[in-house]
Image (cartoon, rainbow, N blue to C red):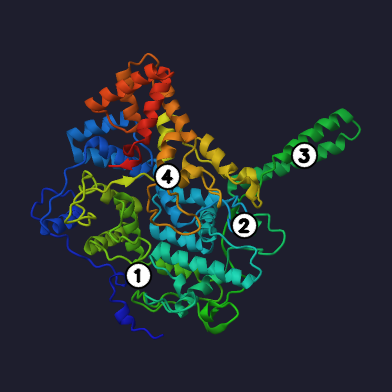
Amino acid sequence: STYDWDKARTFWAFRAPQAPSVPQVKDPGWARNEIDRFLQARWESAGFSAAPDADPEILARRLYFDLTGLPPTPEETADFVAAHRQQAGNAIASLVDRLLDSPAFGETWGRHWLDLARYADSNGGDINLTHAQAWRYRDYVVNAFNRDKPYNTFIREQLAGDLMTAADVNQQREQMVATGFLLMAPKMLSERDKEKLRLDIADEQVDTVGRVFMGLSLGCARCHDHKFDPIPTRDYYALAGIFRSTVTADGIRMNNVNVSGWIERDLPQTPEQLLALARYERDLSLLQEERKRMRHDPEALAACEAALSSLEASAPKTEKAMVARDQPVIENLAIRLRGDVSQQGVVVPRGFLQMVDLGSPAPSLPMAESGRRELADWIADPRHPLTSRVLVNRLWQHLFGKGLVGSVDNFGLKGDRPTHPELLDWMAREFIADDWSVKRALRRILLSRTYALAVTPDTEEDVSNQLLTHQNRRRLPAEALRDALLSMSGLLDGGAAGSPVAELGEQAIPNSSKGITSAQKEQTGRQRSLYLPMVRGDLPGFLETFDLANPDVPTGDRQPGTSPSQAMALWNAPLVKDLALATVTRSLDPTTKTEAAVTTLYQRILNRTPGRYELTNAVWYVDDLQQGEPLDRTEALASLARALIASSEFRFLD
């Protein structure tokens, strides 16, 4: 097909973000920043007014969960409420800055990214090999968010980190690990046609890169020109050639696939590791020489051999990671007619999407490399119309429940139009001007008055709250629900975990083990849900009940649902029962009066003080259970704790 590219580029998402003026408003004293003024101008012109500010206890809970995925302690809530009474704006800014600097920030926002990266600790598919080194990519993402790695660098490292120059070996290792992004997808390893398998892998990577970084569904163009967006099949194969020239599934074969080395590479050794290796080799050589001298002294020889065995058992191991690399031979791909691997058309030079105009001709890709480096630079170019818009829209979606563009993974012609296009463009440009800082972009949104508004019912005139006159009620993510249970009980282990599938070895996971790995660790583990094993086909059941993302596909919006199993889980799940009881036994003294005990449970579970009516009824409930049922006081209080956990208030953010 032929395209009128000038006409195609008139679509809002394919034009560079504009530089709108911050609008004037009727009541300039209401807004806290420019974001508020963009929104205020809209609802003022429509004859609306904003909801009141959220209660400080509610706002504290909202900020803690949004930024760290964990609830505030009663003391943290009380401190914020006191500061908020003194000066609301300063209190919010101080808390936001502290939470952005918390290690838990990277764990929470890193998990959002892992949804997009289709992170898993096993291959899934027909041969469910462990991804024994996937955890290194997980930790790379967490650290990137905690260190506020510039987003354009974050893009480049994940697509081409192995090709980038590095200042030192630690940076080189980090950049190599980042390319695990390309290796995370499930693969049908028993596919007999290996060329089809390689093209299927490239297809998944093309589509993932399109959805994650540009909000475009590129996979549609594998068999024919895209039906809706100006993406010809030629452009699809120009991109696919880049990934076909990349090794992300080495050693594909029919037999002997029960090892995970097919996607692993050795990481370069750090100076500390080289020193440890030198010491090991020195000690090994000394013991070997000593053993020769002990040949005629059986007792001394036995002691020497024992020392030698102990030393060899502790030998430094070369660390491995899931890392992409270029094929030895770089090739341009022929178009596959109607997607049929055996039906080849014209060969297409590797390249990018023609509809994206950066103001200068796209570079020709060298035959010495795959082209991933140039692709990463093209996506991360500040002139790219989609990259910054897509990212700031994702940030907005996580803080308001829906993006300014509702279809967060589709900015194409069939996607939603932005409700506030000028605000979206303004934030995209500010994001780039702030050196692609995710933390600064989040801070700007969080310090807006709009974010801190109360949740109120939608009106008939604005049934979906498009004008953003109030906050949206949002259900907590699955991980936050489990982590909140651990946190309120005082049992949360804040440490990182390494590989969650290490005990399974580097092998295919048999179907007979389904439920064992995930269920045991979900129930008995005390680390954050981020560190649970994400074994395809055997995901943690409690998290799945609350709409854990499917790791087979990039997921920008989990779209939480409601089901009877969720209510049952929050009342009857063994995890809930155990942690409700632990909350009572660990946070309450047996001599605590019932009123004080009830207040403490409200503060730990719902993060607020109970009202007088709630307090009276809860005390009656606890007393009645001790009289009407054979429950002691601890069991009665644990029953109240479970009732609070089962409430909608626990699982939703107001």
Of mark 2 and mark 3, the one earlier in the sequence is 2
Look at the numbered disc 4 and give the secondary structure of its residue.
Answer: helix
Q: Label 4 vs label 3: CA separation? A: 55 Å
Q: Residue flagged by tag 3: what amino acid is it?
A: Leu
Position in image of residue 442 (x %, y %) = 31, 50
Marks 3/1 in contact by CB < 8 Å: the verdict is no
Q: Residue flagged by tag 1: what amino acid is it?
A: Gly
Of mark 1 and mark 4, the one earlier in the sequence is 1
Q: Nearer the viewer, mark 2 or mark 3?
A: 2
| Near-viewer residue (222 or 117) | 222
* Residue 412: quarter of image: bottom left
Residue 117 has which mark? none
Marks 2/3 in contact by CB < 8 Å: the verdict is no
- In the picture of the structure, the residue carrying the numbered disc 4 is 478
Of mark 4 and mark 3, the one earlier in the sequence is 3
Marks 1/4 in contact by CB < 8 Å: the verdict is no
Looking at the rendered image, the quarter that the C terminus falls into is: top left
Q: Label 2 vs label 3: CA separation? A: 31 Å
* Disc 2: CA contacts within 10 A as few (<14), some (14-19) or many (>=20): some
The residue located at (15%, 56%) in the rendering is: 43
Q: Nearer the viewer, mark 4 or mark 3?
A: 4
The residue located at (38%, 38%) in the rendering is: 70
- In the picture of the structure, the residue carrying the numbered disc 2 is 265
Q: Label 3 vs label 1: CA separation? A: 67 Å
Using the image, determine if residue 62 lies above or below residue 342.
above
Looking at the rendered image, the quarter that the N terminus falls into is: bottom left
Q: Residue flagged by tag 2: what amino acid is it?
A: Arg
Marks 4/3 in contact by CB < 8 Å: the verdict is no
| Near-viewer residue (28 or 1) | 1
Look at the numbered disc 1 and give the secondary structure of its residue.
Answer: loop
- In the picture of the structure, the residue carrying the numbered disc 3 is 286
- In the picture of the structure, the residue carrying the numbered disc 1 is 412
